Amino acid sequence: MSAKATGGATPLARTWDNVGKHSFVPEHYEFSDRNAMMAYIKANPVAQIFANHKGEMHLTSAPFIYAPTPGKDMRLAGHIAGRNAYGDAIKAGVEAVAQFISPGAYISPRWFRENITAPTFSYVSVQARGRFVPISDADETLLILAKTVDHMEVLTSAHDGADPWCMTALTAEQITRYIPMVQAFYFEVTALEGIARLNQEKTKADMEGIIEGLSGQENAGARHIASLMNANLKRVAD
């Protein structure tokens, strides 16, 4: 679908064909570059994880970090509380789906400048499918906890300018007490699928109106989507 055929829509827009394998991803919302999806996971490292174990659906949230090894460049690592019922699924090494999603935003037709259509909701999401590899070794569990803290501290300290906190601030007694309370794991990713609903099917004028409308909102989701849309427009202009 050309820009001319869509009344001046940004070249980011293509067709309405579904290109998703496991979820509905219209082509113009496609987000499929593997490096970009892994970068997205690093920037949004908490996911909801779904698994079917012993005939029951299990759902919980967990932080993930990128933990590649030779031959396993899409491996993630994470942990949950040991008394979390989801731990049984992890120990069984089941297949699961991890859904990473950053703050989204409602898009009001009040912000459209040319084509007044129905409202929508914009967001970016990456779905990772894979299998759990449970970790029982105390040292390896501690390593994953330390690396997770380091990753999260970098994300937060980048905003407030404070020195990052690290696990070495804990006493040996505290660490010895905490480790048995944690179920750590590796997540061997077999497939990644992303979607970026950033109004790419809109005209440039409508996208600019949406960005302006979102920029006037106070919530984090609106500012996040406005920033991503603005980056898209700059990429098209370049």
Image (cartoon, helix red, strand yellow):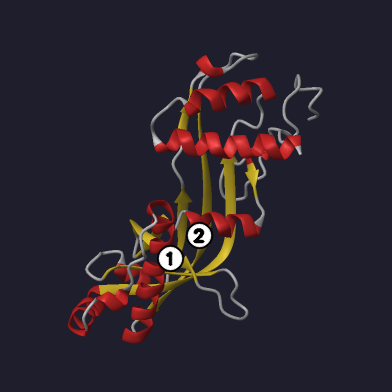
Query: Image quarter for residue 210?
Result: top right
* Residue drawn 80% across the image and 22% down it: 5
Which residue is labeled 2 in the image? Answer: 42
Q: Secondary structure at mark 1?
A: helix
Residue 230, percent across and down?
61, 35
- Residue 49 visible within the image: no
Residue 150, percent across and down?
40, 69
* Residue drawn 59% across the image and 76% down it: 72
Is residue 209 placed above or below 100 in the rendered structure? above
Q: Nearer the viewer, mark 1 or mark 2?
A: 1
Question: Do labels 1 and 2 touch, CB within 8 Å?
Answer: yes
Residue 54, percent across and down?
34, 65
Name the image quarter holding the N terminus. top right
Label for residue 151? 1
Give the side of residue 205 with respect to residue 162, left or right.
right
Is residue 4 placed above or below 138 in the rendered structure? above
Dot placed on the residue nearer the N-terminal end, 1 or 2? 2
Disc 2 crowd, CA 10 A, few/some/many (<14, 14-19, 20+): some
| Residue type for callout 1 | His
Query: Image quarter for residue 98?
Result: bottom left
